[in-house]
Every structure is written in C-alpha cells, then in structure tokens.
Image (spheres, rainbow, N blue to C red):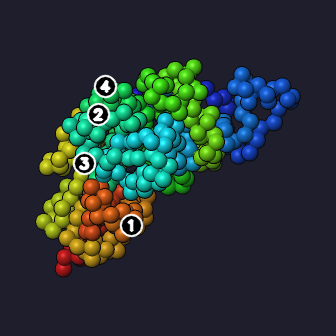
Amino acid sequence: MRFNTKLLHGSSNVKNPQREILPPISQVSAFKYESMEELEKVFQHKSMGYAYTRIGNPTITAFEQKINTLEGGTGAVCCSSGMAAISSALLAICESGDEIIAGSGLYGGTIDLFHDLEKLGIHTIFAPDMSPKALRPLINEKTKVIFGELISNPALKVLDIPAVSALAHEAGIPLFVDSTTATPYIARPLELGADVVIHSTSKYLNGGGNSIGGVIVDGGKFKWDIEKYKALSEFKKYGKAAFIVRIRTDIWENLGGCMAPLNAFLSFIGVETLGLRMERICANADKLAHALSEFPELSVDYLTLPDHPYHEYVEKELNGYGGGILNFRTGSKERAFKIINSLKYALIASNIGDIRTLVIHPASTLYIRSGKEEMEAAGVFEDTVRVSVGIEDPEDLINDFTEAVRSSIE
C-alpha cells in the first residue's frame, strides 16, 4: 500500500465490537470482568485485555497501531503530550550519572526538559552541530543515547540520520529522533537508521489543533546491552523488545502519562488526512518562502530555498519536501511585531502543524527561559518570525504576508 491508502486501510489488531468504521471512544476509567480469575490473567499479562485506562485502552491502542504501521515500528506507546513521550523514552534507559548527547538547536521545551533532568543526575551534552565529526568526541562510557530532531524547530537543521545512526551504533548506543516536524509522510526515521522515533501528536499528526498527545515508536532492531543499560535489566528476557516493554509496563504505567481516549480518537481521525494535508502544507510553505525571499529587507529561512545550508537533504532524506515551517528575520523586534500584528489570516498562536497558518515571535514566547546562546543555536533571534504554514489558498497567504511586510517598511 502507498501512504494514503495505508493511512485508511493499514493493519490493526483492534476489533471494533459493532463493526464501526472508526474505533469507538472507550471513555472509561476501568473495564469489568465476569470473574476474578479473568482479571488476574490480564494483570499477569497472560491474557489479552484491558483493566484500567492508565495502563491500556482500546481507543488508544487503535491510534498506537496506526502510527506504528506508518513508521514501520514493532511497537508504539501513546502519551499525554509530546514532552511526556520524550521524557518517558529517555527515563526508560537513563539513570543518575548517565549522559545524553543532543543537538543544540532543539525546541525550547525540550531544552527545558534536559535542564530538569540535570536535577535527577542525568546530564545532557549539547553538540554544536549534529554531524558525526562533532558528535564523536562527545561519546564516552556514560553516554546512553543520541537525541536529535529530524527537522529542528525552528532552526530548520536536518539530521543526517544514516551517518549519525552509524556512529551511534558503532559506539553501542541508540539514536532517538523527534520527527514531529517531518511526519512519516516526509520521512520515516526508522527506515533511515534511527532506533526510536517520537512525535508530538498535537502537531501535524492531529492537524486540527484539538488535542494534546505524544507517541513513541520502537524500531525493535537495536540490541540492548543490559550490562550497559541497567535500567532495562528486569526486561532482559524480551531481548530487542526490552525498551518498549519497559515503557509500556513500567515507566509509562507508573508515571501516569497516558493519552486520554478522546484525544486518541480525535488524533486517529486527524491522521487519516495527513498525506493530503502535508502535500498542501509543503507546497504552500515553498511558495510563501519564495515570495517572501523577494523582499531585500527580510532574511528567509526555508529548506527548499536554493541557498539554504541543508538544501541537499530535501532530496536526500525528505522526499523532496521542505516541511511546514519557515522563518524570516525582519531586522528588528519592532518590525517583527508589526508584521505579525498586521496579518489577517495567520493566527498568533504557539502551536505548529495546524491546518490554519500560525505565526509567533519565538524569542519572546517559546524561548523566554533560554539564554542568548541557546536561542541563537536554535535559530532564534530578536527579529525572528516563525510561521507554521496551513492549507489556505496560497495566493491568499502570499498576499496577506506581502501586504504585512510592505506596511512594516512604509
């Protein structure tokens, strides 16, 4: 099956009881059984079934299986948010004294999370760039994982997954990739060599801006060294599945970061149009970026622009697409605010991946807790405007933005 067909007809083990074409919303806390013997087997994992929504729910399972199919994984776990997914994935393998290597140009919330992990004794080494040359000297016996964003938000740096995963595997450590901004429509990190892929489902997967969530997908190919990854020692018998089983039956269950059934249902519906939406979003972003690049007063940052430093990766890793985010620098914070406030169609909001075009000044919002060096490493300056392009008619978007830019110049 090709992508859009797989979205609608991909395999699922969840059987809808009344033959519904969509999974029912199991909006319940607990599930009843005819006997205590039956429930005991479920708790012992000797029988399939659900007991309590914090540890499993059929609506959530249906969404997990859909994303797992799209990414080509061996198992997926949905979480209450993208940040819950990242923290659960890292805490599943890291203990006090361990180190994480991450790109310096990450989403501000992820940077804040890494700082919080410092309080637990888990240290993050931020690489100046995510090239094997820069990463190799940072790896030591304490390193447990390399973490990067496929398309960084908002810096628009592209992770060379084949090269970085080869380096990671040479050192016996996994590569975790946040692919929120790419989506499985543009690229599938597991096929490129990554070991675990993470999404904030609140963004492009959902698309409608109506629910928060996250998902972890395990590629199931990394061979976990239990002597090195002592956090997985209780799950040694599961072999290559030790990571996803620990998340499912330990970290995710105990920390309580489960996705709500209604959010899983809304995201299940939303993701079925992912291919159509991403095709339109990427086309719109490309047209808008080229139109804005005509203004000498602006410095436009978008992957399909021929002078972009990561332009080669558009064909190399991203199947010819530049994604849905573009940035431009205006020369001053005042002009950035004036342009944003003059827009008619773009909504001033902090999300990305919506069907509507969203715009924000990241320096005064998303990176308000970050230092100057962290901001600049993430491609954020006082005059930066970030645009999450939607599915509106491109002519309307171009007119809206060009008029706003012209009014800021006059």
Asked if the residue under mark 4 is in contact with the one under mark 2, i.e. CB atoms within 8 Å, the reply is no
User: Which labelled disc corresponds to residue 164?
Assistant: 2
Gap in angstroms between the C-alphas marked 1 and 3: 21 Å
Residue at image x 28%, y 50%? 156
Contact between marks 3 and 2 (CB within 8 A): the answer is no
Residue tagged 3: 128
Disc 3 marks a residue whose amino acid type is Pro
Point out the tag, 4 or 1, that comes first from the N-terminus: 4
Q: Quadrant of residue 346?
A: bottom left
Q: Amino acid at mark 2?
A: Val
**Mark 4 and mark 1 residues within 8 Å of each other at the beta carbon:** no
Considering the numbered disc 1 on the image, is that residue within a helix, a strand or a loop? loop
Give x and y (percent) for residue 273: 46, 42
Whichever of callouts 3 and 4 sits on the residue coming sooner in the sequence is 3
Mark 2 in CB contact with mark 1 (< 8 angstroms): no
State which tag comes first along the sequence, 2 or 1. Answer: 2
What is the spatial separation of the Cα atoms under label 4 and label 1, in whole angstroms?
38 Å
Choose mark 2 or mark 4, whichever is in front.
Answer: 4
